[in-house]
Image (cartoon, rainbow, N blue to C red):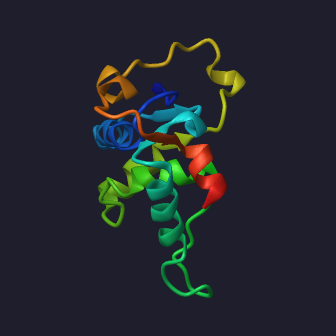
Amino acid sequence: MIVIDATNLILGRMATYAAKQALLGQDVRIVNVEKAVISGTRAKVIEKIHTDMLRGTPAKGPFITRQPDRYVRRVVRGMLPYKQPKGADAYKRVLCYKGLPTEFKDIKPLELKDCSTSKLTTLKYVTVEEALKFS
């Protein structure tokens, strides 16, 4: 089982890594998802998420949640072939948690240096929690 601490990790890069590992058969647990980062100016990130939430018809969806753990899991789903059996199985192996559950306190999380905010060329980014709160 792989435990990823999403604190100060770029959401897209972290989600790609998690999706690849899930396709390879690993169980992936992502903790502290509300502290993951989306790159871009605050206004553009919030506008993008807000327009995604307004897409479709209110009665039929698609429904995009404002809860950070479910939002990050949906981002990972977008990187999986979830309509095929192998993608559906991989999607079941990915779980996201807001905060750090007690069952993972003694497990050392995986450090993803390629996904860190230090890789960003700009200082413009917003945390997932902040972006979902205002959209």
Quadrant location of residue 107?
top right
Residue at 39 percent across and 28 percent down: it is 117
Task: Pick the residue in front: 28 or 57.
Answer: 57
Say which residue appears at 29% left-offset and 40% top-offset: 20
Residue positioned most to the right: 102
Q: Horizontal and vertical percent for residue 1? A: 45, 26
Query: In the rendered image, which quarter contains the C terminus?
Result: bottom right
* Residue positioned 38% across, 48% down in the render: 90
Q: Answer yes or no: is residue 37 visible.
A: yes
Question: Is residue 63 shown left or right of residue 120?
Answer: right
Q: Position of residue 28 (x, y in %)?
A: 45, 34
Describe residue 102's horizontal placement relative to residue 118 as left or right: right
Q: How many marks?
A: 0
User: Above or below — where is 80 with respect to 125?
Assistant: below
Residue 132 occupies which quadrant of the picture?
bottom right
Q: Is residue 41 above or below residue 63?
A: above
Instruction: Tell me where residue 92 appears, x and y as whole percent.
Output: 47, 49
For the question of whether residue 69 can be seen, the reply is: no
Q: Nearer the viewer, residue 16 or 22?
A: 16
Q: Nearer the viewer, residue 70 or 125?
A: 125
Q: Indicate the position of residue 47 as horizontal and vertical percent values.
A: 49, 63
Q: Is residue 46 above or below residue 50?
A: above
Residue at 36% x, 58% y: name it: 78
